[in-house]
Image: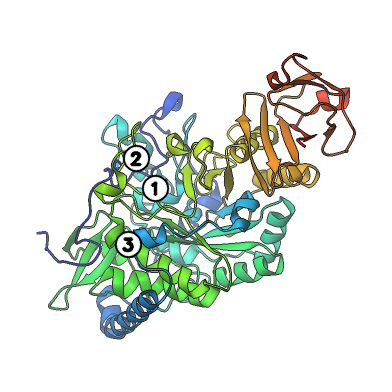
Amino acid sequence: MKTKIMITLAAAFALSAFAAENVAPGETDNLGKIGMPNYPTAPAEYRRPEGYKPYLYKLNLEQISAAYSAETVARGDAVYGKVREINENGKWKATGKSIDKHKCPEWFKDAKFGIFIDWGLWSIASWAPKRDKGAMYPDWYEYRMYTEYTTPKSAYTAFRPYHIKNWGADFQRDHFIPLFKAERFDADKLVEVFKDCGAKYVVPFCKHHSGFCIWPSSFTLRDVSDMGPRRDIAGELVKACRKSDLKFGFYFSLREWEYPILDADGKIKKLEWDGKVEDYTPDMEYKASGKIAVKDYVRQYLIPEAVEFIDNYSPDLIWYDGEWRYRALHSGSYDISAYFYNVNEGKKEVAVNDRYGDGEPDEITGKFTKKKRVWLRTVRGDYYTNEYGDTAERLDPKKYHPWEACRGISQSFGNNWQDNASNVITSKEFIAMFADMVAHGGNLLLIVNLDGQGEIPEIQKKRLLDIGKWLKKNGEAIYATRLLAPFATKDVAYTRSKDARSGYAIVKNPSEEVLLELAIPAGAKVSDLASGIGLSWKYKNAADPKAGAMVKLPENLAKSPLPVALKLDLK
C-alpha cells in the first residue's frame, strides 16, 4: 500500500518527456541492427570471483536509523538553516530569477575541453547490451540488473539474464560495494594523462544515482570511507588537479534510485526514483545499504550533503544530474546553487550547469518547439548541456549561450568490457567532432571510463594521448577562441581569437585545395598553424571576396591523416 507523505521533493513534481523510470536522457529504444543482446560470458575480471560469498554492510537500515538518524536530522536541519541565512543575506537568492543573472565565467568559455570520469560501483560489472549506434549506459547496471526482457523495447534495459549468467541470481546490487577497492586508482597518474591530453577541467562522478559517494560524507555510511576502498577518492583527485592547475567539478545526482524516509511514527519508508513514497520492502537492504533515514530528503540530506562537499573541497563547477523527472522549484538545486555562488562571491568564478529539474509553465512555454520538453535544460544555467544530441535543437550559435557536450570516446557511459576499436572513435573523427563543437560555441566534456579498479583502459588512454599531441601543435585554434561565421561546414570548422585579429580554419578532410567560406582581407597571411609556414591562396571569385578563398596545401598537409589547422589574418 502506498503511503502519502509530504516531503519537499515529492510535494510537487511533474513527469517530463522521459517518463519511463529506467531510461537515461541520451538513450533511444532502438537497438539497431544488432538487435537483442546475446548475454555473453564476461572476462574473469568482470564476472563473479571464484568462490566469492556476497555480503552487505554490518548494520541494516533499522540499526543505522537507530544509531544515526536523530543526529543526522538535527545536523541536516542546522546546515539547511545556515544555507537559508547565507542565501537570504547574500547577493544570490535561491530563485530561478536570481540564478538567471549569474554569468558563465570566462575560464569555462576558454577551457573548451574537460574530462568526465564515469567510474563507480557499476564499473565492477562494466557491461551494457551492444548496439550498432547511439549511447550505451553501463553506469545504470546496478538499477537494470533486476530488469527482465518483456517487450522488444526493453531489450536495451534487460540486464537480468546477463547478470544471472555472470554474477548469479543471489548477487544483489550492494554486493558490488566490497569489490570496489580502487586497487589500481592513482589520481596523480590519471591527472597526468588528462593534462597531457590537453584537458582544462576534470569532473568525476562524485555521487551517481545509487547514492554511493566517492568522498567521506558525514550524511551517509554509503561512501568510500565506511565502505569499499576506505580512502578519500575525491580528495585525492582534487589535490592532483590543483597541483596540475586543472579546474575541478562536482558531479552530483539530485535523486537516488531509493532512499529511506522516516514517517511521522519514525518508521522507515521508501522514497522511489519516481518520487513516490511507499512502504519499506526488504530489497532496500541490498539496494540502499548504508543510507541514513531522514524525514525530509531535500532539506536534511541532499542540500546538507552538497554543502558539505562545497565547503570541504571548493569545486569550480557543479554538474547536476538525475533531475529530469522533478520540478526544480522543489529539488533543492536552487538552494545549492545560490549557496555555491554566495560563498565564492569575490573569491573565484564558478559555474553550474542547466540540469535543475523541470520548469514552471511560464518558464518553458514556447521554449521547445521541435520536441516536447518540460525540463530546464537549455533554459537556465551558466552553461547548457548536450548528451548525445538530447538538446541539440536548442543550441544555436547565432543565439550564443555557453554549452557543453558530454560524450565518450566509445558509445559507453561507464566502462564496457565489450568496447574495442570498432566502436571507439578514431583520432581523426574525434578532432573533427571536437572542432565542430568548439566552432558552434561549445565545450567537450569527454567521458573517460575507468575499469573496475580505477585504471584507464589502454584503448582510451592511447586516444587521449593522440588528442593531446594534436592540441599541443594546434591548440591555439581551440582554446580561448570565439565564434566565427559560418561556424562549421562539412569540411571546415571556424573559430577566431578573442581580439578578432586572427581566424582559424580546422580542415577536417585535408586535400590539395581547400575552400574557406569566409572573407579574408586582401594580402592577408594564411599559414599552417602547427609550423607557421605561409600558404598560397586566392579568392574564389576575385570580384566578390565574400565568396571565400581557395587555399593550396602542400603535399604533407594535403595527405595528413588528421585534420589540419590554418591561421589567417582577419584584420
**Residue ranking furthest to the right:** 533
Say whether marks 3 and 1 touch (CB < 8 Å). no
Name the residue located 31 percent from the left edge and 86 percent from the top edge: 71
Image coords of residue 1 (percent x, y): 9, 59
Name the residue located 26 percent from the left edge and 43 percent from the top edge: 19
Name the residue located 72 percent from the left edge and 32 percent from the top edge: 505
User: In this figure, which residue is indicated by the disc labeled 3?
Assistant: 287
Q: Amino acid at mark 3?
A: Lys
97 to 500, vertically: above or below: below
Mark 3 or mark 1, which is nearer to you?
1
Image coords of residue 261 (percent x, y): 23, 70
Where's the C terminus, which quadrant?
top right
Secondary element under disc 3, as helix, strand or loop, is helix
Query: Callout 1: 10 Å neighbours few (<14), some, many (20+)?
Result: many
Q: Nearer the viewer, residue 368 or 521?
A: 521
- Horizontal side, residue 111 vs residue 214: left or right: right
Q: Nearer the viewer, residue 521 or 169?
A: 521
Say whether marks 3 and 2 touch (CB < 8 Å). no
Query: Callout 3: 10 Å neighbours few (<14), some, many (20+)?
Result: many
Secondary element under disc 2, as helix, strand or loop, is loop
Q: Is residue 220 visible?
A: no
User: In this figure, which residue is indicated by the disc labeled 2?
Assistant: 367
